[in-house]
Image (cartoon, grey):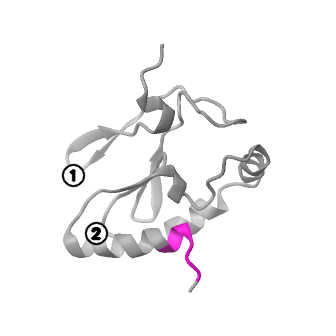
Amino acid sequence: MTYTAGNVIVDRLRWTDQEGVDPAIFTVAFRPDHSYDPETIHSHASRGNSAGTALCEQVAAVHSMLVVGAFVIEAGRVGGRYAKAHPNGPGVTAGSDFPTFRRTGVRYGVNICNDAIRQS
């Protein structure tokens, strides 16, 4: 079997379902389309998020909510996303929204990478 980020996530999510862990949180490096290369980033942006769609299909039957990088995935659907306000990669446009989400009555937000460092 070839191990991909999606396969690793699905394998870990099987464990979270068995153990009752919810949510399951993975770093941005687990995103199947993750890259720091500007040309690769542009290519992914221009053709759509086929890797994200494939990941959603792989995790559709999983009970645990999945947060991978800046995407919140529940029941195989992207329920929300967060765009970094302070991206540290070339060619990435900064986001300006700070959305919050709800899961089992708990309100939460996503804050990743450089955004976790206080900016002046």
Disc 2 residue type (three-letter)? Thr
Counting from the top left corner in percent of width and height, residue 60 is at 43, 70
Apparent side of residue 41 relative to residue 105 in the rendered image (left or right): right
Local crowd size for mark 1, using a 10 Å CA cut-off: few (<14), some (14–19), many (≥20)? few
Q: Where is residue 11 in the image (x, y as percent from the top left)?
A: 40, 75
Would you say 63 lies left or right of 89 here?
A: left
Q: In which quarter of the image is residue 4?
A: bottom right
Q: Give the range drawn in magenta.
A: 2-7
* Number of residues whose C-alpha sits closer than 10 Å to that of mark 2, classed few (under 14), some (14–19) or many (20 or more): some
Tell me, yes or no, if residue 52 can be seen here.
Answer: yes
Counting every numbered tag in the picture gives 2
Of the numbered discs 2 and 1, the one sitting upstream in the chain is 2
Is residue 61 something that shows in the picture? no
The circle on residue 16 is: 2
Query: Which residue lies at the image location 20% right of the left edge and 71% below the top edge?
Result: 19
* Residue in the picture at 62% in, 63% down: 51
Residue drawn at the location 49% of the way across and 39% of the way down: 82
Q: How far apart are marks 2 and 1 (CA)?
A: 16 Å
> Extreme bottom residue here?
1
Q: Nearer the viewer, mark 2 or mark 1?
A: 2
Q: Quadrant of the N terminus?
A: bottom right
Q: Are marks 2 and 1 in contact (CB under 8 Å)?
A: no
Q: In this view, does 98 lie above or below 62?
A: above
Disc 1: which residue: 104
